[in-house]
Image: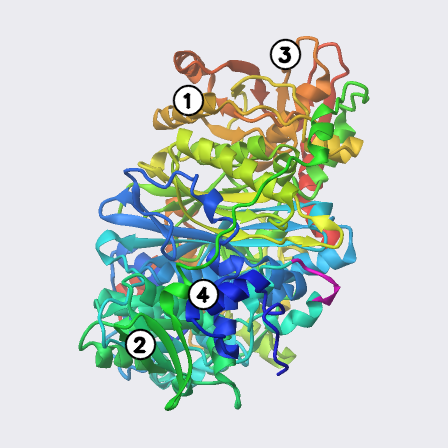
Amino acid sequence: MKELSYREMGLTDEEYRQAAELLGRTPNYLELGMFAVMWSEHCGYKNSRPLLKQFPTQGPQVIQGPGENAGVVDIGDNQALVFKIESHNHPSAIEPYQGAATGVGGIVRDIFTMGARPIAMLNSLRFGPLDETRVKALFSGVVKGIGDYGNCLGIPTVGGEVYFNASYRGNPLVNAMCVGLVRQDEIALAVANEVGSPIMLVGARTGRDGIHGATFASEELSESSAEKRPSVQVGDPFMEKLLIEACLELIKEDLVAGMQDLGAAGLTSSIAETASKKGLGVAVDVLKVPRREPGMTPYEVMLSESQERMLIVPRKGKHNRITEIFEKWGLDAVVIGEVTGDGLFKVYEGQELRGSVPVAALTESCPVYTREGQEPVYYKKKQAFSWAELPDECDSQTILALLASPSIASKKWVYSQYDHQVMLNTVVLPGQGDAAVLRIKGHDKGIGLVTDCNGRMVYLDPFRGGVMAVCEAARNLACVGARPLALTNCLNFGSPENPNIYWQMQQAIQGMSLAARTLNTPVVSGNVSLYNETEAGAIFPTPVVGMVGLIENLENRMDMAFKNSGEIIVILGGLRTELGGSEYLALIHDEESGEVPAPHLEKEKVLIDLLLELSARKLLSSCHDVADGGLAVTLAEMAIAGSMGFAVSPPINGQRADEVMFSEAPGRIVASLPESSLAEVEALARSFGIELHRLGTTGGGLLQYKLEGKADISVALEQAAHSWGEAIACHMS
Amino acid sequence: MKFGIIVFPGSNCDADCFHVIEQVMGQEARYIWHKEPDVTACDALILPGGFSYGDYLRTGAIARFSPVMSRVVDFAAQGGLVLGICNGFQILLEAGLLPGAMLRNRTLRFICKPVHLKVKNTETPFTRTLQEHQVLRVPIAHGEGNYYCDDKTLKELENNRQIVFTYCTPEGIENDAANPNGSLANIAGITNKAGNVLGMMPHPERCSESVMGGVDGYPIFAAMISWLQEVGR
């Protein structure tokens, strides 16, 4: 293998100088490699750390905030949820199947490393326009990669989102979230705390795959990125399944002091992280590491990102029992080194010392860059755009076109490739509600899970877009009857070295922080993915929010399907008319512009409380938030889900019909309810201070929109269901 | 009744079957690790779904060589009830307990969705609670569920009434549109000649409680229990 220069490894001249200073000498090739991966954005968060400090991370529900493999929240009864979302964008861009599969594998390891049984997966995906051949190949490869890996593990993939937009053309986003369930007294942390403890490596053998994957993930994609295909790891879900079962057995028997998965930067990172928490050192011998191929150098062994490997630090005297359990599962566990007291990370090859770096130099001394953000030129221009001159295209053709827009259309083509029912917990399935709902066996309670982010809104106004991402996630949870508890996020942006991109990061994180604080949904884990850009430019800033919520009584859960004919349809939160950033402007008028509708955070909080009260009193038959495509699409989706039409006449008060029908302004819910509940619902809404409008009634086989002073719009339910249901399959066949 | 649930490395519906047998059906369930040599204490065996040995080589192809499989063969030969679900069905085919083979779904994609099944034979220990031609709604979740066998075998299956479930429309019509994976003759589940071994691709354990959105799988487990109670092993 050709030796790389420090620059090719991703270190700047200044960083190289700092590394040499920390060592007190010129680093050798192995040591340089260790610095380069540990100081990459992916491992060291050097560009994002100052911004991430703004996130609220505390709350009575928080058991473990950021800093561990995943966050942990209390759900009562000595139980907790462990969850995190993570990106695998760059690998998926050049090798979609393996890139996505190993993304799933990595996030699942983060969860069971904490001692939790993984119980659900979600994913948030972004691709270029679906009519392009290359995009179709990426899309189908990613979906198959996620499915094949998660299905084999027997972890249901219960939710997520997929958007298609030109900004993601060369740089798709593949963010995977995993949620685990754990007894609070069995939560495991990645800490080596005793000098002399052996360090064990278990799982797959180490090969040359994925070397410098963390560095590769921290630079822009370019024409030559395909040459980095060897930087993409190859997944083996069967091995991972064995690891899950074996590692959870170790935890049940209380055999481990520390457990850490091998992810980005492989052995280097997992060993450094395990040792750094207590200021200890470590000595490892690369010859003891089982290899897949001969002739690997210490550098290659230490930097390999081969998948499905775990590092175990046993409790004193438990080493033999651990080996027994691994043998039962057909896994080889070997001791590769031991914990030392000198604070040094020493790498031996047999008797020969090949590298020695202070652990703290790799972790705590990672450089931090606070950059200057600068408002991009596009911002004010886009904000100033007015749709007043555009024709009002509110008609049945537009509604059908929106329903068939791949970003809005049913994602059945995607989720039917994922096993979403295994484990027998999924009670609100994909496509049925605004969030997935799982029961917790043996209890009355359940949990709601969701991911959200509208990248276009964040692009047009990163602050408001950031607020909206958090609000939408919380609102979606409330729409299934779940109280939002906490969130994880995956911050996908372009290059932070570009002041305009850095400004997007600053603004979005500020907005998300404010919303998370107001809604009492602290950030407990997350991941940053920067340099998401190609020669054609950066992606839409896409800070994906993954949120979990608690349903105290599962009987109170709600979904979006109209249930009974002749029920009243209402909108809560008002009729708003701002079209900025809407799918309608983008799809029909080819304008990704306009002022992003202002989120009203305090109102949003009250709306969530109101929804929870309505669900506790079982007053609603169905409930769905107004988001992509606006009110017209929200109503259509509820009708399609319930195979039941409706007739509505929203009061438009002299506004343009398209404004009322297609505005994506946040903070609004459509619900259906029996006539007999109306008075109580109205009274409750009034007492919470939430505007309520009666829109119409359910029933029949038509979607009927009657707008004062305009021609009535009528679409056959069957036609709407076909446009919405088959759009993606049609593109893909 | 005591149900043995056989666990191979990579099985992943084992806990689901365990839950249904114990919590829903109120019977005793026991995991049987694939290296265990003894299944004699069980009244019935379930081979659950999953990806035994990662589906490497071919679904079920490696699991059939597991030590426990010769015991399953003996158990079946003595008339014991054996239910193979999804990957369990695939293993039963590979082990020769049931005739035929599985091909990849004709879409070449994994499919997870509810399908409708027509009950073709109610005179088996697994279907005695059902009505002839009753339509059940049961979820599938598989990538290789495209059942295939030669003409002679198909004739035998038909003549012996070994075809127990076929894919059909909600109205009970067995046509190509209702066939999710391309299975020969819309076959979703078959028994052996003696009728004591059933393999089915759909997952009855996923629809045995109303909270899961349907209870059409319940009668299959109930049938096994009532048969064991009345007829015994």
Q: Amino acid at mark 4?
A: Leu
Image location (x, y in percent) of residue B39: 28, 79
Q: Which residue is mark 3?
A: A651
In space, the residues marked 2 and 3 are separated at their CA atoms by 68 Å
Image location (x, y in percent) of residue A57: 37, 41
Mark 2 or 4: in front is 2
Q: Earlier in the sequence, mark 3 or mark 1?
A: 1
Q: Residue at x 78, y 24 (%)?
A: A393
Specify the principal SS of the magenta part.
loop
| Up-down relation of residue A192 to residue A593 (above or below) | below
Q: Earlier in the sequence, mark 2 or mark 4?
A: 4
Q: Which residues are magenta?
A: A220-224
How many circles with numbers are drawn on the protein? 4
Residue A57 colored in magenta in the image? no
To the question of a shared chain for discs 1 and 2, the answer is yes
Q: Earlier in the sequence, mark 2 or mark 3?
A: 2
Q: Amino acid at mark 2?
A: Ile
The chain ID associated with circle 3 is: A
The one nearer the camera, B170 or B90, is B90
Is A399 displayed left or right of A463 in the figure?
Answer: right
Q: Which residue is mark 4?
A: A153
The chain ID associated with circle 4 is: A
Q: Which residue is mark 1?
A: A606
Quarter holding residue A92: bottom right
Disc 3 crowd, CA 10 A, few/some/many (<14, 14-19, 20+): some
Residue projecting furthest to the left: A317
Q: Which residue is mark 2?
A: A199
The reply to whether residue B97 is in sight is: yes
Mark 2 or 3: in front is 2
Q: Amino acid at mark 1?
A: Val
Q: Residue at x 72, y 56 (%)?
A: A136
